[in-house]
Image (spheres, rainbow, N blue to C red):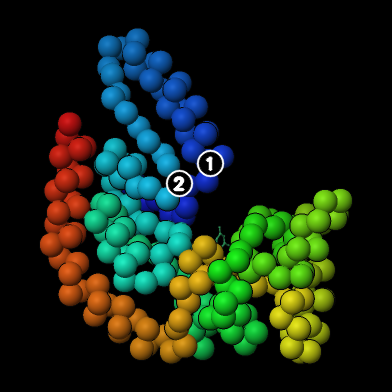
Amino acid sequence: MKYVLLGNLSPEWAKKQSERVGKAKAKLDKLGIKIESIHYTQGHYDFVDIVDAPVIAAGGIGDARGVIAALALGAEAVQMGTVFLACEESGASLLHRQALRGKKAGHTALTKGFTGRLARGIYNRLLEELNQEGTAILPYPLQRGLVRNLAIPAEAAGRADLVPMWAGQSASLSACTNVSAFLTSLVKEVSEIAEPIIQWGASRRQKQILK
Ligand SMILES: Cc1cc2nc3c(=O)[nH]c(=O)nc-3n(C[C@H](O)[C@H](O)[C@H](O)COP(=O)(O)O)c2cc1C
């Protein structure tokens, strides 16, 4: 395996890649080699056409539709995170799991306030206040320790508004309670139609790479 891609493509990452591609193109131009087109677009998978290596799609995939879509777009596999957090077997707290399965999971935002590093969470009072302009955030991992001091008693008091609730953009798709039942049903749904899609996606991608 030469290369594995994980995670969503952020606009910042895409910009950096474009700059790198720009520089590489200039060098290739000098050698008389032309790259026709490269797209790194968040939420799209155009890049799998030009990556001659297995790709794992991740970010915002929460059900069989997402898995099938990623496979059709050329990914070899998917990584799902947030939807598993809602399962009883996950290490997430009861409040966190309930919130993931609730209506508020549809509203998430980015924050450095939970740990000092950028993360996405369900939008609650804690996130809102930590994101207010002028709020000082300690460097990682100190901020995490600070927030934990608040989160532990908040959790015990059932205060979902004051607990950090990490969640990806697929959070509103979280329906899992029992991981075994969730996985069995996911695998069944995907298996019913995956094979021809995987073959179609792979052959299409191969053609693109050979172009
Ligand atoms: C338990 C857990 C721990 C995670 N830890 C990290 C991490 O340390 N760094 C990071 O960039 N993302 C982390 N993530 C986010 C994953 O990269 C993300 O869940 C994954 O790409 C799948 O996206 P999804 O959550 O939208 O399905 C974590 C996710 C989970 C569920």
Q: Is residue 76 visible?
A: no
Which comes sooner in the sequence, label 1 or label 2?
Answer: 1
Tell me where residue 1 appears, x and y as whole percent.
29, 51
Q: Residues within 10 Å of mark 1 (few under 14, many from 20)?
A: few
Which residue sits at x=27%, y=12%?
32
Which residue is denoted by mark 1 in the rendering?
11
Q: Is residue 64 left or right of residue 88?
A: left
Please say if 129 is above or below 89: above
**Residue 175 tag number:** none
Which residue sits at x=30%, y=83%?
185
Residue closest to the far front = 103
Which residue sits at x=52%, y=62%?
169
Please say if 127 is above or below 174: above
Residues at circles 1 and 2 in contact by the CB criterion of under 8 Å? yes
| Disc 2 within 8 angstroms of ligand 1 (CB) | no
Which of 26 and 189 lies nearest the eye of the viewer?
A: 189
The image quarter containing residue 49 is top left
Tell me where residue 189 appears, x and y as whole percent.
25, 77
Tell me where residue 21 appears, x and y as whole percent.
42, 27
Q: Is residue 55 left or right of residue 167?
A: left
Which residue is denoted by mark 2 in the rendering?
42
Q: Is residue 191 visible?
A: yes
Which residue sits at x=17%, y=69%?
193
